[in-house]
């Protein structure tokens, strides 16, 4: 949890590890936090990888999939407000993933994602919803 919070703060850019695994990691952080810094890091890594002959693309944004699994009770996932928010997130995610290099679509996705995140955190704060931004699957196991 502390790792995600510290990543969201304005910090000087550290040296990026140039690897496909780190690019995936940065896209995962972006999908969780909607922090464009992670998206930009992934794009930078991709550029460096392509210079070295990498043939792949940016991993797709997967916020909807993370949010879909973030409800502790399946019934809550089917509430009208949740359905509306999830549909909005899916719409903007699909648009971005279709043209991931489009900065206009990126900005719209970030705006919509932060709105959905805020709405769900405000409404479901008693354990029904666990914000994916508060989970760091990459943190070292203690």
Image (spheres, rainbow, N blue to C red):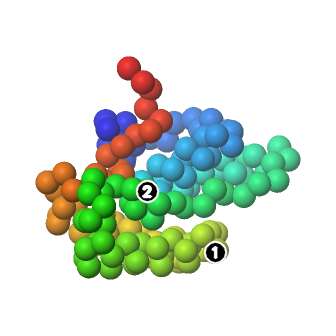
Above or below for 96 versus 50: below
- Given the current orientation, which residue lies at the most extreme left position? 126
- Given the current orientation, which residue lies at the most extreme right position? 53
Above or below for 3 versus 95: above
Where residue 95 appears, as percent x and y from the top left, is: 56, 77
Q: Can residue 26 be seen in this view?
A: yes
Residue topped by disc 2: 66
Where residue 35 appears, as percent x and y from the top left, is: 42, 56
**CA neighbours of label 2 inside 10 A, class few (<14), some (14 to 19), many (20+):** some
Where residue 61 appears, as percent x and y from the top left, is: 54, 61
- Given the current orientation, which residue lies at the most extreme front position? 75
Q: Which residue is drawn at 75% across and 46% down?
A: 49
Q: Quadrant of the N terminus?
A: top left
Q: Which mark is residue 22?
A: none
Quarter of the image holding residue 85?
bottom left
The local secondary structure at tag 1 comes to: helix
The local secondary structure at tag 2 comes to: helix
- Given the current orientation, which residue lies at the most extreme top position? 142
- How many labels sit on residues? 2
Looking at marks 1 and 2 on the same chain, the residue that comes earlier in the sequence is marked by 2
User: Going by the image, does 65 lie left or right of 5?
Assistant: right
Q: Which residue is drawn at 51% across and 60% down?
A: 62
Q: Which residue is drawn at 61% across and 40% down?
A: 22
Residue topped by disc 1: 98
User: Going by the image, does 15 lie left or right of 110?
Assistant: right
Instruction: Say which of 68 and 38 sits in front.
Output: 68
Give the distance between the C-alpha atoms of the residues marked 1 and 2, in whole angstroms: 19 Å
Q: Can residue 41 be seen in this view?
A: no
Quarter of the image holding residue 81?
bottom left
Q: Residue at x 81, y 48 (%)?
A: 54
């Amino acid at each position: 949890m502390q790792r995600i919070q510290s990543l969201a703060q304005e910090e000087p850019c550290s040296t990026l590890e140039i690897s496909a695994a780190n690019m995936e990691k940065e896209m995962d952080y972006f999908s969780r936090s909607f922090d464009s810094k992670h998206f930009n890091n992934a794009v930078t890594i991709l550029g460096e990888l392509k210079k070295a002959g990498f043939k792949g693309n940016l991993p797709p944004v997967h916020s909807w999939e993370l949010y879909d699994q973030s409800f502790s009770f399946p019934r809550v996932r089917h509430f009208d407000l949740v359905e509306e928010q999830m549909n909005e997130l899916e719409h903007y995610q699909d648009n971005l993933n279709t043209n991931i290099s489009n900065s206009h679509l990126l900005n719209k996705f970030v705006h919509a994602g932060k709105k959905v995140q805020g709405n769900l955190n405000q409404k479901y704060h008693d354990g029904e919803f666990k914000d994916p931004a508060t989970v760091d699957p990459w943190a070292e196991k203690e």
